[in-house]
Image (cartoon, rainbow, N blue to C red):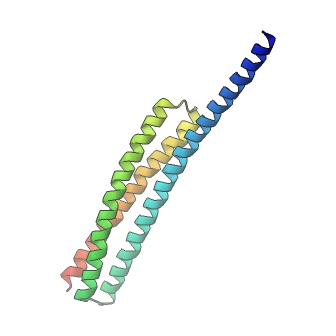
Amino acid sequence: YLQYDSLQNVVDSLINKVNVLQHNFDFLELSYKLDSQISALNRCANELRISSNGIYINLVDKNIDANLYISYRKSYNASIKLLERYEKSVQTLKSYVNIKMLICSFNANECAVLENSYDTLNASYNAAEAALKHMKTILDIYKDRL
């Protein structure tokens, strides 16, 4: 019996360590996925702002050209498709985070970190969406000046 109890203690200890590792992995995985998506959305919003600034500079410099407009329009259309893909991936990630937060026993600090990242994800998507709308506004002004 003594040998069995000792073996059982080792097994229980290993099970506990695996559970702790799984918990840590779940938290780190969610944090990484959220941070990666936030970074991608911020990069997208910045690129859209840079493109809008380029269009605006050409407006101010009166560098108005039909071919340039066509190029800008293609870029805008590609950006629409990109943002649509981001929207789908954001929704999928948000669902995944919600499910993981329900099934994993994260402590209050871990929940706060994940909830903050979740809110930042929403803000980053909204910023990218706003940058796309701004680009459309500048592009419409450019088109009107042709």
In this image, 90 relative to 137: left or right?
right
The quarter of the displayed image where residue 26 is located: top right
* Residue 117 % position (x, y): 50, 47
* Residue 93 % position (x, y): 42, 46
Q: Which residue is nearer to you in this view: 51 or 67?
A: 67
Q: Is residue 10 above or below residue 110?
A: above
Q: Is residue 141 above or below residue 4?
A: below
In this image, 11 relative to 81: left or right?
right
Quadrant of the snapshot with the C terminus: bottom left
Q: Is residue 139 above or below residue 83?
A: below
* Residue 111 % position (x, y): 53, 37
Residue located farthest toward the top when viewing the structure as drawn: 1
Q: Residue at x 50, y 45 (%)?
A: 116
Q: Which residue is nearer to you in this view: 99 or 127?
A: 99
Q: Residue at x 59, y 41 (%)?
A: 25
Q: Which residue is nearer to you in this view: 138 or 65?
A: 65
Q: Residue at x 31, y 74 (%)?
A: 75
Quadrant of the snapshot with the N terminus: top right
Q: Is residue 45 above or below residue 116?
A: below
Q: Residue at x 50, y 55 (%)?
A: 36
* Residue 18 % position (x, y): 64, 32
